[in-house]
Image: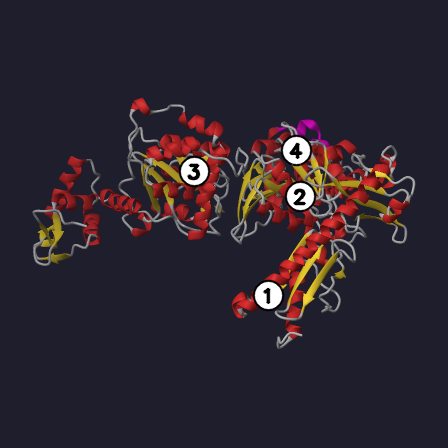
Amino acid sequence: MSTYHNISIAEQMFRDFLASNEHPLDKEIDHDSNKFHYFSCPHGGKTDARYKFYSDGIPSGYFKCWYCGIEDDFISKQKNDVSPQEWQAHLNRLAEIKRQEERTAKKQYSDHAELARTVFSTALEANAFEHDYLLKKKVQNYGLKIVGTVNQYTEKAKCYQGTLLVPCYNANNELVNIERIYLDKKEDKYKKRPLAGAQRTGAFYMLGEVTPDKATILIAEGYSTAATIYESLGYPTVITFNCGNIPPVIQILRDIYPQSQFIIAADDDRWQKDANRRHAGENAAKKACAEFSNTTYVLPDFSVLGISEDKLAKLESPPTDFNDLFVFLVNQGLARNAALAEIARQIMPKPIPHAEILGRLINKINPVNFREQAALREGESPKNNHYQIIVVEYLLQLAKSNHWGICKHLDFVYLFNGAYWNLLDEEELKIFLGDVAEKMGVDKFKARYFNFRDHLYKQFLALARLPKPEQTKNCVRINLKNGTFEFLPDGGVLLRGFDRNDFLTYQLPFEYRSESVAPLFHAYLDRVLPEKKLQDILAEYLGYIFIPSSTLKLEKTLLLYGTGANGKSVFYEVVRNLLGEPNTSEYSLQSLTDDTGYYRAMIANKLVNYASEINGKLEASIFKQLVSGEPVEARFPYGKPFTITQYAKLIFNCNELPKDVEQTEAYFRRFLIIPFGVTIPDSEQDKQLAQKIISSELSGVFNWILEGLQRLIKQKSFTECDIIQRTREQYELESDSVKTFLFEKGYSSSPTDYVLIKSLYEEYRIFCTDDGFKPVNKTNFKRRLEASKIQTARMNIGNVAYITKISYKNFG
């Protein structure tokens, strides 16, 4: 036995190790290391998991689960806590275990593969489509067989008459296992079991085939789920047979189909009675998405059933997968094709036009008795207010009970179109409310009258309690055509399916492709902005657009500064098209900071406000609020004021920097000024450059932005750059006419010499007239002198400034 002072500690560590692999041990640890000890897999059978525990030397162990296809080793001490000899002995022992395991597995796999092939070859396919399991699951047969005549091979494989067989193939397209689906008469339910001892890891079965027009591969755990989504979409669909086998199978498929996108139709195990199995499907899918590029996952959305989560959880067999959802929908009376369309919409959603969504909602409306609803007396007729209140209350109650994708945030109404929350136009909503009223039984001449619809709209805004979904804090998510890109807390990233709970109100107009590059775009940047750090800051700021202010608050607006023919307009066109024009605005800084608040209301649903110029006077206090991402007041014409907290970041192109601005540190530190100092000769200008980048490189440009975003999250600040600092200092000087006057005239502070401020101010006014500056008044002139560290005093001759003119310029 080991001299380890307390073997019970090592045992507890080993138990924790098994639990961390989602395979807790429910019995005493057996110390006999000459053989494997079997125990129950939470996801499979009672003997699928096994281990060895060594109590001699360094207490250590080895674990493997046939069902989940995972293995791992354990050691109770760190390498630096033991001698080199002890550590090497542990490694040698572990290597020998794995060699034995490989030899055993190879022989076992070979024998069982031969048995599987024999059994499957003699089984019958003709009547498989009539199997009760397939009828119960409401799916068709795609290459499955039924055991007909029982023989020595079927008995050895425990495949009895009527057993449904699903073939399992390896990477070489060799049949290596079969999944047996049979009715357990004692429990009166169907069970699925592979051949014990046959290969499971990396074994799969594909429905359909990969073709150039159908290169996306769908992945599911079980046959019924795979058949359901294959019938709904027609894309090749792979069965992995358990969630632990998803990563090994994707690795095989990635090697065969390197350009394919994978969508995992994961099981939602949150209502499993066994706590160890809850969320297993989603966790495995997340792991695969983090490990493999161009891989997303999606969970079934059971809210379309119109059954509360509490009721679903209390069912004897709560739904977990897309087949369960499909069967529920059909049993509720939905036509088979309509149910398949819903499955297709959830797995590969395409934004649905508002008219179609609202049309579906209208179909749910039934006539009502307005007199009865209003509790009116005999002979009394409903008035407009009765109609308006009853229509809106009925609609809101229906929306809530049916989990419609509709919500109200501030004074905006949104519809979830399957991919993102889209803003519902005021006129669209008015027409919809009028149609609802008419469907409920309001006379069409009343329901279609504009004034009646206006009042319905106002009543809807007044009564609507349709809160937006609560978003996860400290999380960065980006919505693209092929899924939602998410940055994980541990620094990892994954691409997953759309989720209404993200409350993302946009979708970028291209797909995420990890391998995409942008050679034209990078050549353009190298030409117009050769300094690498400036390029990095551009990427970081575009990444910053997607970070909520509650997650990272850097209080910066981006200015691209320089005269014409320097590439700013190309960047402007690329950014607006990359983000999608519906997700951008281009209001001037003067408009955004005016007193009305109208323009601020319009950036509440935008990613960025990118204006091609920054001219005009701005309100400094509102400007600082906007750049800081602080709550700011806004309103619509004739509407009540409201506060916006999530709104567009600010980018501006400018040939000149704003003048006559607030001379404070708080103002200047909010600018991130990128100087575009390279002028491109006419002979070298490509007038179609922006369109070339937009048409072929947006996904590659996005990957460049992701690098900047990851860098920004890690640094918690923009990359430091001397050019940025010098440009800002120059701007501070040139934006202050008083500082510029002192600098240009060679004035410097003096402890003894002084000049009458009245005389100095007259000289300053002449300077401003000659050089095109707008002079400040005399009071502000004195304040700015003091801000420039020049002392002032009142003497009997008047106010003076302690200043002297020197032969060389030494002002700073």
- Residue 598 visible in the current orientation: no
Task: Choose top left, top right, bottom left or bottom right for residue 367.
Answer: top right
Circle 2 packing at 10 Å, graded few (<14), some (14-19), many (20+), is many
Task: Choose top left, top right, bottom left or bottom right for residue 429.
Answer: top right
Left-right relation of 379 to 70: right
Asked whether disc 3 touches disc 4, contact meaning CB atoms under 8 Å apart, the reply is no
Under mark 2, the amino acid is Val
Q: Marks 2 and 3, Cα distance to the nearest angstrom?
A: 44 Å
Q: Position of residue 1 (x, y in %)?
A: 67, 74
The residue positioned 9% from the left and 54% from the top of the image is: 754
Q: N-terminal of the two: label 1 or label 2? A: 1
Q: Marks 4 and 2, Cα distance to the nearest angstrom?
A: 41 Å
The residue under label 3 is: 609
| Disc 1 versus disc 4: nearer the observer | 1
Under mark 1, the amino acid is Ala
**Element on which disc 1 rests:** helix
Magenta stretch, residue numbers? 435-449
The residue under label 2 is: 249
The residue under label 4 is: 358
The residue under label 1 is: 89
Q: N-terminal of the two: label 3 or label 4? A: 4
Q: Check if residue 467 falls in the magenta segment.
A: no
Q: N-terminal of the two: label 3 or label 1? A: 1
Circle 3 packing at 10 Å, graded few (<14), some (14-19), many (20+), is many
Q: What is the chief secondary structure element of the magenta stretch?
A: helix
Q: Check if residue 447 falls in the magenta segment.
A: yes
Q: Position of residue 116 (x, y in %)?
A: 80, 43
